[in-house]
Amino acid sequence: MADAKLFTRSKAQELRAELQVADKKDKGFAKKKTVLKKIVANMTMGNDTAEECGMLIDLAVAPLFPDMIQCMAIQVLEIKKMVYLYLINYARSKSDEIAHAIPGFLSDCNDRNPLIRALAVRTMSSITSFTIISALIDPLRNALQDTDPYVRKTAAISVAKLYAGETGRRVVDNEGFVAMLRELLADANPTVVANAVAALIEISDRSSDITLRLNSTVSGKLVAALGECSEWGQVYILDSLLSFTPQSPNEAEQLGERISIRLQHANSAVVLTTIKVLLYLMNYMEDESFISSLERKMGPPLVTMLSLGPEVQYVALRNILLIIQRRPAILQHEVKVFFCKYNDPIYVKLAKLEIMYRLARPENVHEVLPELKEYASEVDVDFVRKAVRSIGRLAIKIQPAADQCISVLLKLLQTKISYVVQEAIVYADRIENSDELLEDFLFTFNEEPTEVQLALLTAIVKLFIRRPTAGQDLVPRVLKMATEEVDNPDLRDRGFMYWRLLSSNPTATRDIVLADKPPISTETDRMDKGTLDQKAFDQRKWNASKTIPETNGLCATCLPSLQVVLDLLPLTLLDKTTTGCLLHLTMARPTPMPS
């Protein structure tokens, strides 16, 4: 029968009748297999469904539970797989009947076929019933010491599955299964070792008392097993090496040399995990020449990942961003490979842009800057904004290239594209003829988007404070427009605030608006060493996260509507003696500003 025909809705009575008919003259259990396939198909079709064990199951075939238990006596692996799948899915809803399956489970745990023994142990560990868990204790202990490696590796994973539940956790702790898992780390079969490592890592992540710790002997055996493991087994073993603390620089260097061959693996997960372990071991190394040789080995496999699909590229790029913050020498000569392609998805382009900035140096800025200028003419607004912002950050990061960066920003201002102007105008105080450029935009102030109006207002006020002669004609005009000719409350309130500051005490205004700030640095978003190590060496936190700055001086009511303002308005504008929300202060018309 074709598989498509199996997915027809049937009643439990009909399926039970077919099971009974299949018992007669069924050579090779062919009929029984067909009926069981129909039952499994109906189980997943969504007729009168409930969620069990993470999947939707059909309650219409739940009455067949006793009939399926009877099928456990058939010693055919294909049939047992379907029966066990059914039992796992309905065990919770049939908790009063699941005990009847225990004799069949125990019989299969002692079967001559290792596949059946392993299947029985795996199925019992997937059922959360206390009755089944209690019955599993002895079979699981025997399976961990079974002569067949397939049974041992299945039993190792079953211990981790048991530990995921509260009842199973107590059983694992009381019966000493964790100690037996540690013994499997010395198993002769690499697959068993990999599964034991995976189980111990899973248990240590869930437990506050159990921690995976490796000594030099065990770590050496794990590395020796890498060559015969599957790619995912290699990932687990490599990840476990982060639990090993080298006792000497020589020990760290020897281990690093042994695992560095994994950098040539075709699987990207193996490569990234190897790099993670090498970065960890470098903390214990002292031979700078050896460290440099490892850094040179890490670069090519990372570059190779950029030729894969966009999803893999993005994962690699986020990892590379962490890696170059920790060890910038790894890719210091490879900035060109991160230049954006026309068909790159936007999330890949944004990730590449950040890495380009991180890798920019006086030696390669002449290559990076024209590339960023070209990106500023793209159609994606977020990408263009970040490209323009990166040009400004380069001017701060690489002082010899500051004039070139300012020249590029001046050319971008001539485009009069609103979001380009908004980003470029932030650097107005560094541009000699900024008053002329700002005045040109002031003529079209009322037609500009709100974001550009906010940026113009702030830039002109700062220009006036820094260079009063250049900005004295612009400030009254922009304040009048902002407070009388626009409807946007954010813009109007900011205009009133500047007006009040300037009219009350111009000297004090300078101290507030241009108060001493920490030195401008392009490394403010750089993670500290502790946080970087935590992200780089913890697989579950490998993806980068963003830190949201504190917003002191603004209440929760104003915060959602003022995200743009927060990005542009320095918090130092708030008088340190003032309490409450900055924008809820009385905003009556200020007194005329003195000339």
Image (spheres, grey):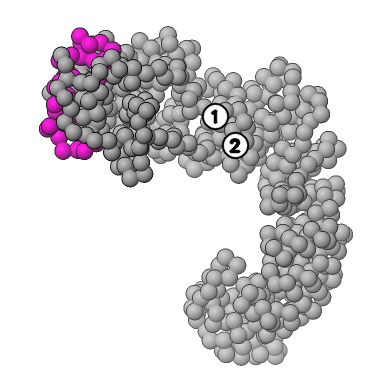
Q: Name the residue under label 1.
A: 527
Q: Name the residue under label 2.
A: 535
- Give percent across and percent down for residue 357: 45, 23
Q: What secondary structure characterizes most of the magenta part?
A: helix
- Give percent across and percent down for residue 141: 84, 62
Is label 2 in a helix, a strand or a loop? helix
Would you say residue 540 sits in the magenta stretch? no
Would you say residue 464 sits in the magenta stretch? yes
Q: In this view, does 369 lie to the left or right of 502?
A: right
Q: Which of 567 and 424 is in front in this view?
A: 567
- What's under tag 1, amino acid-wise? Met
- What's under tag 2, amino acid-wise? Lys
**Vertical arrangement, residue 461 with respect to residue 225, above or below:** above
Q: Which residue is drawn at 34% across and 26% down?
A: 575
What is the span of residues highlighted in magenta in the rendered image?
Answer: 461-490
What is the spatial separation of the Cα atoms under label 2 and label 1, in whole angstroms? 10 Å
